[in-house]
Image (cartoon, rainbow, N blue to C red):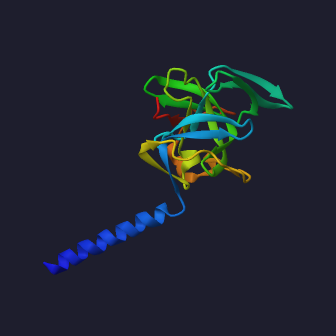
Amino acid sequence: MRQPLRLTLTVAALTLLAVAGDAFGKSIFGWIERVKLMDSDLIMEAKLDTGADTSSINAPDTEEFDKDGEDWVRFEITDADGDSHTFELPIERTVRIRSAAGTTRRHVVRMDMCLGHIRRKAEINLADREELSYQMLIGRNFMEGYVLVDSGPKFTMDPTCHDEAEDVDAMDDADDDKDADQAPEDEGNDETAEDDADD
């Protein structure tokens, strides 16, 4: 009887050590947090969603335009006070988002964001989130390697970033490439498909 018990305890101890090692260096946040857009000092209430591939923000009205031979997009974000903030950014790529409501096509831009003390420049898709509870969603592309989500609390830490943002390229990760379903082959096509668990 002692040998099986000793083996069970050993396995349990190794499991705990593995979990602790994986969590080392990561910060724990609630499932709803305030996120600061560093380029405008705009603070948004965001849902931290581990089921979403890419972060998302409410920008239902977008306008594409050409700037120095590159595709850019102009869009507005409305804060909690009803004030609109206009952004103009280059289009990184286009994605098809699968959700309960169906499949939609969204532009992806790169934005400098701050969650607590974590500042990263990451991809974020421009969506119509008017009917959803939160105007912003933080996905795995921002959180991976840095954030653990506690499903109970909200607003555990205000954004306090000062350092220069780390540039995150979500599509360079080999695991993400394996998970993403490619769009039908077409020369020059830069669309991929992703899941948006929030919808």
Q: Quadrant of residue 112?
A: top right
**Residue 16, percent across and down?**
37, 67
- Residue at horizontal 57%, vertical 23%? 128
Residue 41 located left or right of residue 137: right
**Residue 70, percent across and down?**
80, 32
Tell me if residue 146 can be seen: yes
Observer-nearest of 22 and 114: 114
Residue farthest to the bottom? 2
Q: Quadrant of the N terminus?
A: bottom left
**Residue 187, percent across and down?**
68, 33
Residue farthest to the right? 68
Where 78 falls versus 119 (above or below)? above
Residue 14 located left or right of residue 137: left
Residue 108 located left or right of residue 139: right
Where 20 falls versus 29 (above or below)? below
Observer-nearest of 185 and 194: 194
**Residue 81, percent across and down?**
64, 24
Where 160 falls versus 85 (above or below)? below
Tell me if residue 192 can be seen: no
- Residue at horizontal 64%, vertical 45%? 114
Instruction: Report the number of discs.
Output: 0
- Residue at horizontal 51%, vertical 42%? 155
Observer-nearest of 120 and 70: 120
